[in-house]
Amino acid sequence: MKRFIIPLLMLIILSETVSAMSLDYFENVMDIDENSVHYRLSLLFSKSPDGEIHLPLFYKIKNFKHTANFGNYTCEKNDESWGTDVFCRFMGSNGTGRTLYLEYDTSDDTLLKRVDGKYVFKSSVKSPLETKKMVVTARLSEGFVLIDPNDRSVSLPPYSPESGKKSSDGRRIYVIWERADVEKGDGIDISVVFERMRGRGGIDPLYFFGAGIIVLGFLFILILRGMRNSEIPTMILREDEKKVIDILKEHGNSCKQKVIVDESGYSKAKVSRLVSDLEARGLLKVERRGRTNILTLLTPKD
């Protein structure tokens, strides 16, 4: 019990310090495989941050990194008996940037466990500040699928909360949860149960290929509908992601993937990864024509 009380008290004590700060958008993307999880957080402040925030994590982390599109800030992590305390201090910025990025890895067995050949991932994602919109994405590594809802070997659904939206980019399966007007310290407690895709002696992989095509079709329809009432701020994009978006805009919001490679100076592998990430987040549509990818921008115009 003490493990949970200490960080909660920390949030209460710091409430006056951070009360002047809030977020327009908070995104947490988790890339999950059988042994570890990579977290990528994007925090878009409502105005230039000034003060400090703590992000208590009830697990151990490694490979901690941070970047921002503004200066005059510091971030560090401290190992505690109950997990990890991520602490950031902001000294005020004269620029227009308002986005902070945090990344880290974890192999903590309190998050990821193996049960009867299945993998169970649970994470409690809390917002460090009052947030207008919160988006949480859990992405499985290639070769893994969510369990069948009728699988009785695990007493958990494929994902929870069931309000999440399951989809695929053709290579990886992911689930997205969204909440609006989130209070500081509140958030979403998620879980996903997955397994390796079975081949011989199990389900034919062609089944998943066909299902993936169908899912992509529905995803495209959902994106077209959702873009009318859902905005994803382009300010949360990294510089390399923004460069891809800018090139697309220069070509009338649509061009071949090869054009991105030629004009960005990035390698084919890097562009492929960036396109996959942007597609998974609903910012791009990728139409495959033979050996060529046609990219179309789906974000609202700035």
Image: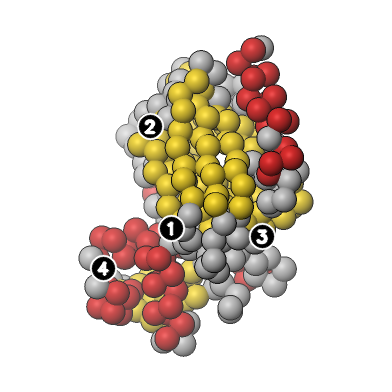
- Alpha carbon distance from label 2 to label 1: 22 Å
Residue where numbered disc 2 is placed:
62
Label 4 to label 2, Cα distance in Å?
Answer: 28 Å
Residue type (three-letter) at the residue carrying disc 3: Ser
Label 2 sits on a secondary structure element that is strand
Query: Label 3, on which residue?
Result: 46
Q: Earlier in the sequence, mark 3 or mark 4?
A: 3
Side of 258 relative to 302 (left or right):
left
- Closer mark to the observer between disc 4 and disc 2: 2
Label 3 to label 4: alpha-carbon separation: 32 Å
Please rate how many residues cluster around mark 1, counting C-alpha atoms within 10 Å: few if below 14, some from 14 to 19, many from 20: some
Query: According to the image, label 1 marks what residue?
Result: 277
Query: Label 3 crowding class (10 Å Cα cut-off): few <14, some 14-19, many 20+?
Result: some
For the question of whether residue 116 can be seen, the reply is yes
**Number of the front mark, 2 or 1:** 2
Mark nearest the camera among 1 and 3 is: 3
Number of marks drawn: 4
Tell me which label, 4 or 2, sits earlier in the chain: 2
Q: Quadrant of residue 226?
A: bottom right
